[in-house]
Image (spheres, grey):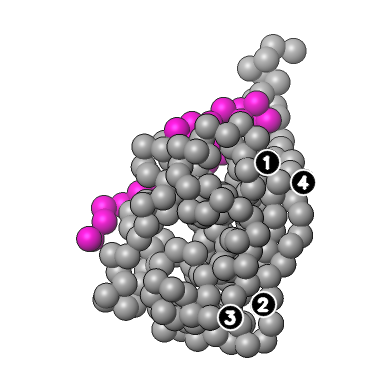
Amino acid sequence: MPALLALALALSAGIHAPRPPIVWKPIPFGAARRAQTAAYAERHYGLRTWRLVRPRVIVEHVTASDSFSSTWNAFASDAPDPELHELPGTCAHFVVDRDGTIYQLVPLTTMCRHTVGLNWTAIGIEHVGTSDAQVLADPAQLRASLRLTLWLMSRFHISLPNVIGHAESLTSRYHRERYPSWRCQTHADWSHADMDGYRRRLLRLARAEHVALSRAGGPVRSRC
C-alpha cells in the first residue's frame, strides 16, 4: 500500500497518540487547597470550582531550577506564591526531568496555578532547566516532552496552535483575567520563536505516529 494512502487511512481511523511512561508523584492537594483554588478561580475567572473541565490549551514552562526535587517542593508548599502573593501556591500538572522522566503531580481533572489568565482551561507542563534552549538541546528531555504533549493533544483534542509557551499566554484566545493589574502578566519562558520550533517538531512526530492534528484556533492580538 502506498505510504500516502496508508497515512490517509490511519488518520481517518482516528489513531490516538500513545501514552508515554509517566511517574505519579502527587503534591498535597487536599480539601484546603481545593477550596483555595475554587476561591482563586472565582476571583480571577468568575468560576467557583477547583476542577479543570475540558482543557483547551497546553502551556509549556521552564522551571528556572536544576532539579525535579526543588520544583516538587515549591509546588507542594502551602504558602502563597512568591510573585503574586496569593493562595493557592503555584503548580503544574507535569514536570519533565532532564533524563526524560515524566512526573505527574496532580490529576488532569484538577486546576493548577501555572499561567495567569489560562489556569481555568490549561494543562501545565514544566521542564527542569534554566532556559528554552537548554530543553531544546537535550534529546531525552525534548523527546519525552513532545510525546507527552502529543498524547495530551490527542486525548483532549487540543489543536496545534493551542500548544503555547508561557510567553505566548497573552495572545491565547482563551486568556481571561478579571484583575486589571494582572491582565498583562506573563513570563518569558518558551518564547514564540522557540515554540515555533517546538510545534514543528510536534507536527513531525504526529506525522510519524499517524496522528491527525487540528490547526484551528490560532493566536489573537494581545491587548497589552
For the residues marked 3 and 1, what is the alpha-carbon distance in whole angstroms?
A: 28 Å
Dot 2 and dot 1 residues touching (CB under 8 Å): no
Mark 1 belongs to which amino acid? Answer: Asp
Question: Which label's residue is closer to the chain start, 3 or 1?
Answer: 3
The percent position of residue 114, horizontal first and vertical second, equals: 49, 64
Q: Which of marks 1 and 4 is in front?
A: 1
CA neighbours of label 4 inside 10 A, class few (<14), some (14 to 19), many (20+): few
* Residue of label 4: 21
For the residues marked 3 and 2, what is the alpha-carbon distance in whole angstroms?
A: 9 Å
CA neighbours of label 2 inside 10 A, class few (<14), some (14 to 19), many (20+): some
The image quadrant where one finds the C terminus is bottom left
The foreground one among 75 and 144 is 75
The image quadrant where one finds the N terminus is top right
The percent position of residue 198, horizontal first and vertical second, equals: 49, 36
- Identify whether 123 is placed above or below 81: above
For the residues marked 4 and 3, what is the alpha-carbon distance in whole angstroms?
A: 29 Å
Secondary structure, mark 3, is: loop
Secondary structure, mark 1, is: loop
Left or right, 66 with reference to 118: right
* Residue of label 1: 99
* Residue of label 2: 29
Mark 4 belongs to which amino acid? Answer: Pro
**Which residue does the image show at 41% across and 50% down from the upper left?**
189
* Residue of label 3: 78
The foreground one among 159 and 167 is 167
Mark 2 belongs to which amino acid? Answer: Phe
Q: Can residue 135 be seen in this view?
A: yes
- Identify whether 52 is placed above or below 67: below
Q: Nearer the viewer, mark 2 or mark 1?
A: 1
Question: Which label's residue is closer to the chain start, 1 or 4?
Answer: 4
Q: Give the range drawn in magenta.
A: 197-224
